[in-house]
Image (spheres, rainbow, N blue to C red):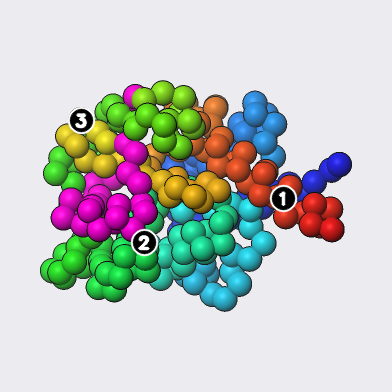
Amino acid sequence: MTYPNPRVALVGDRSPAVRSHARIPGLLDALAEHDHLVLDAYWIPTGDAVGPGALDGFDAIWLLPGSPYRSEAGALAAVRTARERGIPFLGTCAGFQHAVLEYARNVCGLAGAVHGEDHPDAPDQVIAPLSCSLVGHEGAVTVTPGSLAERVLGATRTLERYHCAYGPDPAYLDRLTAHGLRFSGADGSGDLRILELPGHPFFLASLFQPELSGDGTRAHPMIRALAGAAVTHAEANSPAATA
């Protein structure tokens, strides 16, 4: 049986100045060539993502780096749509930060939760400056055994490139985890670098940039895993499968 190619929403404010954005076309080609995962990818500016139905019909949502976004509401809408509808989700760097922010507001009841980069003087900075900024460096991330992240990465330790200076404020971690969010990777300073949502078909976010891994000729395991989840979603929701 032939299924249509999965449709993936690349949510972010595309810019040639953002290295991760420039890498995306090559990574999509690599997925098709090396992994036989052919995706129909559509760039969705954050200002458009907030509109009704803007993310209907997609088999995966990838919230890309590029903070501050032009529309915080659009970025949060992308996370919420994926979380509530069971659509495979990957958030990288700012995508991780806004996944935490959306969860804090809409699941944990922290209506006043903010991102410290956008609101440096506000209370409830659920996303705050990291204790040790490693922007522009590579560093090891220790991964929780038995987690989705470990299954995706195939290891409990990985070397990743950092371009993210903000992350979850430790003061809010107990509340976030008590409501079901799981943090499954941390760097050598103890700053959290991976999150996932148990019970969701595929919900993973990294406070590092897998787009910048290697020379760009092969997709990072997290990106391959998103593509595989998109294929599964597309097949399960095709007209033939639902007939």
Q: Earlier in the sequence, mark 3 or mark 1?
A: 3
Secondary structure found at label 3:
loop
- Can I make out residue 65 in this image? no
Could you say where residue 226 lies in the image, as x and y percent from the top left? 55, 42
Which residue is pictured at 67% across the width and 43% down the height?
231
The type of residue carrying mark 3 is: Gly
The type of residue carrying mark 2 is: Tyr
Which residue in the protein does label 3 denote?
188
Q: Nearer the viewer, mark 2 or mark 3?
A: 2
Secondary structure found at label 2:
helix
Residue 61 covered by magenta stretch: no
Check disc 2: other Cα within 10 Å, few if <14, some if 14-19, many if 20+: many
Q: Nearer the viewer, mark 3 or mark 1?
A: 1
Q: Earlier in the sequence, mark 2 or mark 3?
A: 2
Image position of 152 (left or right of 133): right
Residue 86 location, quadrant? bottom right
Q: Earlier in the sequence, mark 1 or mark 2?
A: 2
Could you say where residue 220 lies in the image, as x and y percent from the top left? 49, 31
Q: CA distance from mark 3 to mark 1?
A: 40 Å
Residue 180 location, quadrant? bottom left
Residue 103 is tagged as 2
Magenta-highlighted residues: 157-185
